[in-house]
Amino acid sequence: MNLEVLKTENLVVSYGDKRVLDCLNISIYKGEFVGIIGPNGTGKSTLVKAITNIIDSHSGDIFIEGRENRNISKKERAKLVAVVPQEFSIDYEFTNLDIVMMGRNPHIDKKNKIGQKDFDIVKEAMTLTNTWDFKDRFFNELSGGERQRVIVARAIAQQTHIILLDEPTSHLDIHHQLEVMELIHLLKKKRNITVVAVLHDINMAARFSDRLILINHGKVVADGTPEEVIKEEHLSKLYSMEMIVRENKILGKREIIPLRAIKELTEKKGINIHVVCGGGTGEKILERLKSLGFNVTAGIINEGDSDWEICKILKIPCVVAPPFSGYSNEDADKNRILINQSDYVLVTSVPFGIGNLLNLEVLRNIEKPIYFYQNSKIDIDYAQGKAIKLLDELQKKENFNYIQNYDELLQKL
């Protein structure tokens, strides 16, 4: 059975009359890496401040390792929970060794002075974070990434079972963001430490977290694995932007691709466009047409093709053929049905070989306006001249048009 190490019950935190956390209920278990995500101003950092007792809760309870937070002294809490803040600044000239040694303060009193054991713990923490080499330099001389590693070392030196990260990478470049997150993730694996990380970078959160908690207006909107939480229906409205959610095949993780916060407007609602594409040639225009409100279909596309993936993500109806196979007459019939239901046909700069030549052949008897994207940099004929012959035949039709770019098509529509 998983051991619950951090819990909130109906937690309410207010700033004046404004409720920032509104009856928040979360449970964190031993050894988890939990990412807390959500739009700005929804209470993520407030949760960290409430747990560390920097701000008072209006009502509700917080339990740390089974103990009520309000009954835990500041020193005892520092033995249970360490914090890595967004940034840490100090006015005095402390060496990095001094800063990390501060992590031992909760364990030092009149009976327990700083000793060799504390020095060994600090050295181990700084070695783990690759900060030991500049132990004698002043903290304020370091770069942002180096400072953050020192603060992580200080948290490690506290030897707590729980580490809270409050947007620890928000002021770092991408290299140092990744460095800090990899370090924390390694620490969690090596020492079975529980990590609760408030993160504004959704992709970084999905990459390193075992579980994600999505918060909005001080309440939990979604709680589960990254695969369960990173969904377009959860995120697009909360963040008020258009996005694509897809699998990163290299990392094996969900990721979002932000597209636009300001939606393009069109007066052409209810227009049906069928797109003949493949090999990634349709990705951009499929998304744009869908975003503009057109009714979009596509085909024929092989399953596994990147254009097929975009259709799947955007829920665009398309005719799908088995992977690595040529198209059948049955596929062509299905494609013809979608084309006949459309108002316009767009052919991208997809290369044509023997396998997908049916996509051109089916256009012979189509009387709908056909727009062919002509890209001189791409040789489209890989069918021993058959594609060029079909194009020459199609060009003679009055409904056939060449376009130089997709904006030209949108202007015509």
Image (cartoon, grey):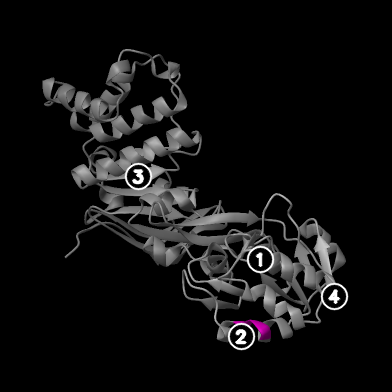
Front residue of 32 and 247: 247
In the image, 287: left or right of 292? left
Please say if 86 is above or below 389.
Answer: above
- Mark 3 lies on residue: 164
- Mark 4 lies on residue: 397
The magenta-colored residue range is 332-336
Instruction: Say which mark, if any, is on residue 334.
Output: 2
User: Is disc 2 in contact with disc 1, using a CB cutoff of under 8 Å?
Assistant: no
In the image, 383: left or right of 141? right
Q: In what element is the residue under mark 4?
A: loop
- Image point (56%, 86%), residue name: 330
Q: Position of residue 256 (x, y in %)?
A: 52, 56
Residue placed farthest to the front in the image?
384
- Image point (40%, 64%), residue name: 227
Question: What residue type is disc 4 on?
Answer: Lys
Question: What residue type is disc 3 on?
Answer: Leu
Q: Position of residue 180 (x, y in %)?
A: 38, 36
Q: Position of residue 312 (x, y in %)?
A: 54, 71
Please say if 36 is above or below 125.
Answer: below
Quarter containing the C terminus: bottom right
